[in-house]
Amino acid sequence: MNVDANKLMPLSEAVSRFVPDRAHISIGGFTINRNPMAAVYEVIRQRKRGLHLYAHSNGQGVDELIGAGCVDRLEIAYAGSGRFASTCIRFRKAVECGQLPVEDYTNYQMTLRFMAGAMGVPFLPTRSSLGSDIVNRWGFSETDRHADPRVPNRKLAVMDNPFDGWCDTDRVVLVPAINPDVTIIHVQAADRQGTARINGLPFADVEQAKAARHLIVTCETLVDDDLLRGAPERNQIPFFCVDAVVHVPMGAWPTACYRHYDYDPTRLHQYRHAALDDERYQAYLDTDVLSSANHEEMLAGIDPRQLEKIKADPRTGYAVGLDRR
């Protein structure tokens, strides 16, 4: 392995190389926080199809990929964008129309599934979901499961505790590992080798990153190697997990990136209005996403005053006084 390898590349190249049609893909972030939106928009521009999507509790990224017709199957714990959409709008429409098979897990189960993938084990046990319909209701048909060898033949398995007698747990749930073809995350800082640093809550991004066969890291700031090496305990992603580094400032917009910018309520309200109607949504895709060549050009079409309002306060890491209504 070449420790000095330069993995820096344009976003269009990273998506073209590591996100083929019908890939199993995972995206990081949580609801409207640190979604890898620049990469999501690039996947949409390149018109990727047949994706099998995994996410922990994602909102905007999941909804836009589904709305653009990129996703054939989804495995997730929660799909929502906070007050803007307690349940993601295009996600909900696709499920209600029978267009999108979804396998539903708890938040903890999805974290364990990515962790199992990162550990190289086929499953991990938990008590999560015992006594709930998550155990009984399966979203993928037997035909779907047999059609793709990368999909486990069962959603989960409930079994007796094999070590009965030393604790009070009689039954456990086994959840299958996830090993995506590619995971995409957005971070605050990375170097050209791929070492990456997340400020604030990491959510399940670290487990998702380490579980993947390939990893694309988009970053707000591209830093010198020595800067990250100076405080290695603050780095969550080691360089050897990373295949592509993409420097894309505001790469999580319109979701938030702690200590850089808050979520953009104006844009998210505009998105909600478009997403509620099929014709408006297609117009949104054509005008706001597909018409721009890249994320930089997309942002150039936004009122600078709107972007100024969401800049993070250096003390709090959030936009103080932002009108979130």
Image (cartoon, rainbow, N blue to C red):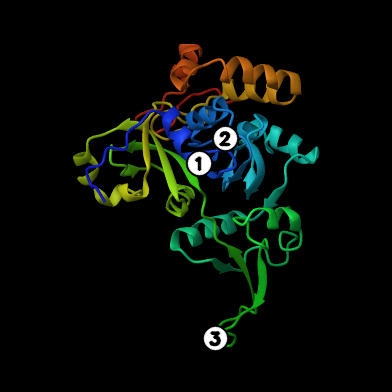
Q: Nearer the viewer, mark 1 or mark 3?
A: 1
In the picture as drawn, the residue positioned furthest to the bottom comes out as 165
Q: Tag 2, which secondary structure?
A: helix
| In the image: residue 266, left or right of residue 225 | right
The residue that mark 3 highlights is 166
Q: Which residue is mark 2?
A: 61
The structure residue drawn at horizontal position 44% and vertical position 31%, both measured from the top left corner, is 318
Q: CA distance from mark 3 to mark 2?
A: 44 Å
Question: In the image shown, does 112 or 246 lie closer to the viewer?
Answer: 246
Residue farthest toward the right in the current orientation of the protein: 97
Camera-side residue: 177 or 261?
177
Q: Position of residue 4 (x, y in %)?
A: 22, 43
Where in the figure is residue 16, as x and y percent of width and height? 47, 33
Q: Is residue 244 above or below residue 260?
A: below
Is label 1 in contact with label 3 (beta carbons under 8 Å)? no
Residue 121, horizontal then vertical, whole percent: 49, 66
Q: Residue at x 60, y 42 (%)?
A: 22
How packed is label 2: few (under 14 Cα within 10 Å), some, or many (20 or more)? many
Q: Earlier in the sequence, mark 1 or mark 2?
A: 1
* Disc ID at residue 68: none
Q: Which mark is residue 29?
A: 1
Q: Label 3: state its secondary structure.
A: loop
Q: Three-letter amino acid code at disc 2?
A: Gly
Foreground tag (1 vs 2): 2
Percent of width and height locating residue 177: 55, 60
Which residue occupies the foreground of this view, 106 or 283? Answer: 283
Discs 1, 2 touching: Cβ within 8 Å = yes
Residue 222 seen in the current view: yes
